[in-house]
Image (cartoon, helix red, strand yellow):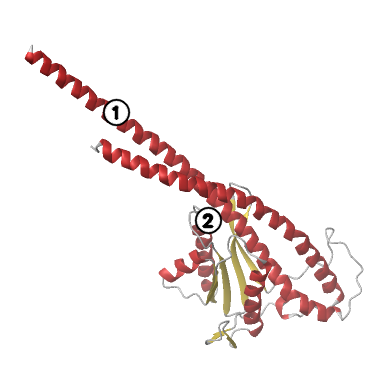
C-alpha cells in the first residue's frame, strides 16, 4: 500500500497535469470558432470559382484539358494525407492515417503505385517510423493554414500530374527528380460538428466533369477575354488549390474539435483521479490516527 507521502505526491502530479489539459482545452475551444469562421469565409470564393468554371466549361465546347481527362491504364497515383503537427487530439490522426492506408491498399489492388505526400509532422513521423517512403511533406501550418500553403502543395502536385507517369520532374528542393503521376487523391478530416469529424477520401485530379446545368449555379452570361479555353487552362489549377485549401481548413477545424474533446476527457479523468487519491490518502491518514490513539490509550491503561 502506498504511503501518505506517495499519495500526496501523486495528487500534486495529477493536479499539475490537470492544469495543462484544462489550458489546452480552452485554447482548442477558442481556435474552433476561428477555424469555423475561416471555413465559412472561404466558401463564397469556392462557390464563385465553381460558377465561373461552369460557364467556362459550357463555353469551351469539348472538355479536353489534362486535369479533366481520365488517362488510360494509370500507373501511379499520388496520395496527399492531411495530418496535424501536434498531438493530444485523440483519434484525429489515427483515423485519417487508417483511411490513408486503406486507400493505398485499394490503389495497389488496382495495380497502381501509390506515391505518398503528407502535411503535418504526425503523418510524417507515422510513415517514417514504419519505413514507408514519403516523397515530400509540408509542415508547420496544420492549425492555421493559409491559401498560400495550399497553393504551394497544389502547384507541385499539379506539375507532377501534368507530367504523367514515365516523365521525371525536379523535386521542390532541386535535389533529384521524381516521376510524375496519373491521379491525385487527398485524405483529410471533414468537420461535421464539435463531436463528429469524419475522415474523407477524395480524388482531386483528374476531376469529374464540371456541371454545365445547375440550379445552384445559374448562368451568369459572362463574356470571356481571352478565350474560354485559355481561361479554363488558367483557372483549373487554381480550382485544385481551392479544393486542397478547403480540405486543409476542414482538417484544421477538426483538429481543434478533436483536441478539445480529448483534453476535456483528460481533465475530467484527472479530476476523478485526484478525488480518488485524496479519499485514499484521507482513509490512510485516518487509519494512522486511529492506530496512534489506540496505542496511547493502551499505554495509559498499562501505566494505570
Which residue is found at the position 74% from the left and 58% from the top?
41
Quadrant location, the N terminus? top left
Left or right: 15 as drawn, with respect to 34 = left
Quarter occupied by residue 290: top left
Left or right: 304 as drawn, with respect to 188 = left
Which x, y percent locates residue 171? 56, 83
Q: Residues within 10 Å of mark 1 (few under 14, many from 20)?
A: few
Which residue is found at the position 51% from the left and 62% from the top?
97
Helix, strand or loop at mark 2: helix
Left or right: 281 as drawn, with respect to 22 = left
Provide the residue designation for mark 2: 92
| 169 over 219 or under it: above or below | below
On residue 274, which mark appears? none
Quadrant location, the C terminus? top left
Marks 2 and 1 close (CB-CB < 8 Å): no
Q: Compare marks 2 and 1 and give the one earlier in the sequence.
A: 2
**Farthest residue in the top direction?**
304
**Farthest residue in the left direction?**
303
Quarter occupied by residue 253: bottom right
Which residue is found at the position 55% from the left and 83% from the top?
173
Which x, y percent locates residue 7? 30, 38
On residue 283, which mark appears? 1
Amino acid at each position: 500500500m502506498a504511503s501518505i507521502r506517495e499519495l500526496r505526491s501523486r495528487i500534486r502530479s495529477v493536479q499539475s497535469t490537470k492544469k495543462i489539459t484544462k489550458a489546452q482545452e480552452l485554447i482548442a475551444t477558442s481556435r474552433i470558432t476561428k477555424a469555423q469562421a475561416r471555413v465559412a469565409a472561404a466558401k463564397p470564393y469556392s462557390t464563385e470559382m465553381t460558377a465561373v468554371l461552369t460557364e467556362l466549361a459550357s463555353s469551351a465546347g469539348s472538355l479536353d484539358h489534362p486535369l479533366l481527362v481520365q488517362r488510360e491504364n494509370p500507373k501511379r497515383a499520388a496520395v496527399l494525407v492531411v495530418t496535424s503537427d501536434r498531438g493530444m487530439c485523440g483519434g484525429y490522426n489515427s483515423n485519417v492515417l487508417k483511411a490513408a492506408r486503406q486507400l493505398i491498399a485499394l490503389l495497389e489492388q488496382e495495380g497502381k503505385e501509390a506515391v505518398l505526400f503528407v502535411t503535418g509532422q504526425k503523418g510524417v513521423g507515422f510513415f517514417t517510423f514504419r519505413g514507408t517512403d514519403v516523397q515530400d511533406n509540408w509542415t508547420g501550418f496544420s492549425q492555421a493554414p493559409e491559401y498560400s500553403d495550399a497553393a504551394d502543395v497544389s502547384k507541385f502536385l499539379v506539375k507532377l500530374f501534368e507530367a504523367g507517369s514515365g516523365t521525371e520532374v525536379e523535386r521542390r528542393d532541386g535535389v533529384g527528380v521524381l516521376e510524375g503521376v496519373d491521379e491525385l487523391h487527398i485524405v483529410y478530416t471533414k468537420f461535421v460538428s464539435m463531436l463528429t469529424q469524419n475522415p474523407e477520401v477524395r480524388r482531386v485530379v483528374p476531376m469529374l466533369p464540371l456541371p454545365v446545368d445547375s440550379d445552384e449555379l445559374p448562368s451568369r452570361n459572362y463574356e470571356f477575354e481571352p478565350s474560354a479555353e485559355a481561361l479554363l487552362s488558367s483557372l483549373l489549377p487554381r480550382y485544385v488549390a481551392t479544393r486542397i485549401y478547403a480540405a486543409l481548413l476542414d482538417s484544421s477545424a477538426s483538429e481543434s474539435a478533436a483536441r478539445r474533446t480529448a483534453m476535456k476527457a483528460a481533465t475530467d479523468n484527472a479530476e476523478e483521479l485526484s478525488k480518488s487519491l485524496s479519499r485514499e490518502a484521507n482513509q490512510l491518514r485516518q487509519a494512522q490516527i486511529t492506530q496512534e490513539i489506540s496505542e496511547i490509550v493502551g499505554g495509559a491503561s498499562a501505566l494505570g
